[in-house]
Image (tube, rainbow, N blue to C red):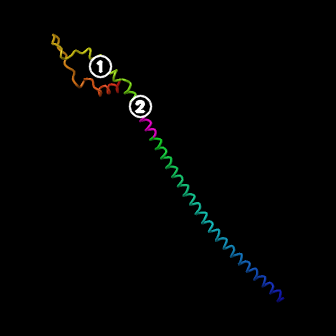
Amino acid sequence: MFMHFRRRLAAAKGTEEALRDIADILHEVSGRVADRAELVDRIEELELSRAKWEAELEGLLMKADSKLKASNNAEARTRVMKKSYESFADEGLTDRETEIAQEVFQHIPDGNVAPSRAEPMPAMLEDVAQNDKAAAVRMKFS
């Protein structure tokens, strides 16, 4: 019986050692799992910060692209307006204005004519005489 007791005692000691080994392994595994969880959290943080950074860059690129398009459109409008203005000035409207002025002046007697019984017509004031600015204003509102 004593032998039997010793065997049981040896078996119990073996079981106890096996359980301690299992507990140590479980403790080590749980530590690694905790470390892994920390790593996973850190990776998720890094991925989130990278996604934010990429979104900010995308927004800046879109903003720069819209400013580029707006400036190109403004430049194109300026070119079109300049061409329109140049073609308007080159059409010979000054010749047409000159023709109209000559036609009108034909009907106006010279201020230096000999006096007659009728009251002489006064000379034209400079304010109403033909000049480039007045022609431009008339063309603008006609």
- Tag 1 residue: 101
Which residue is farthest bottom?
2
Is residue 121 shown left or right of residue 45? left
Query: Which quadrant does the N terminus fall into?
Result: bottom right
Residue 36 left/right relative to 139:
right
Q: Amino acid at mark 1?
A: Ala
Q: Residues within 10 Å of mark 1 (few under 14, many from 20)?
A: few
Q: Quote the CA–CA distance across marks 2 and 1.
A: 27 Å
Percent of width and height locating residue 51: 56, 55
User: Residue at label 2?
Assistant: 83
Q: Name which quarter of the figure residue 127 lies in.
A: top left
The quadrant in which residue 24 appears is bottom right
SS class of the residue under badge 2? helix
| Range of magenta residues | 72-85
Pinpoint residue 139: horizontal percent, then vertical percent: 34, 25
Residue drawn at x 56%, y 60% is 46
Front-most of residues 56 and 22: 56
Asked where in the image residue 6 lies, by quadrant, the reply is: bottom right
Element on which disc 1 rests: helix
Q: Is residue 107 magenta?
A: no
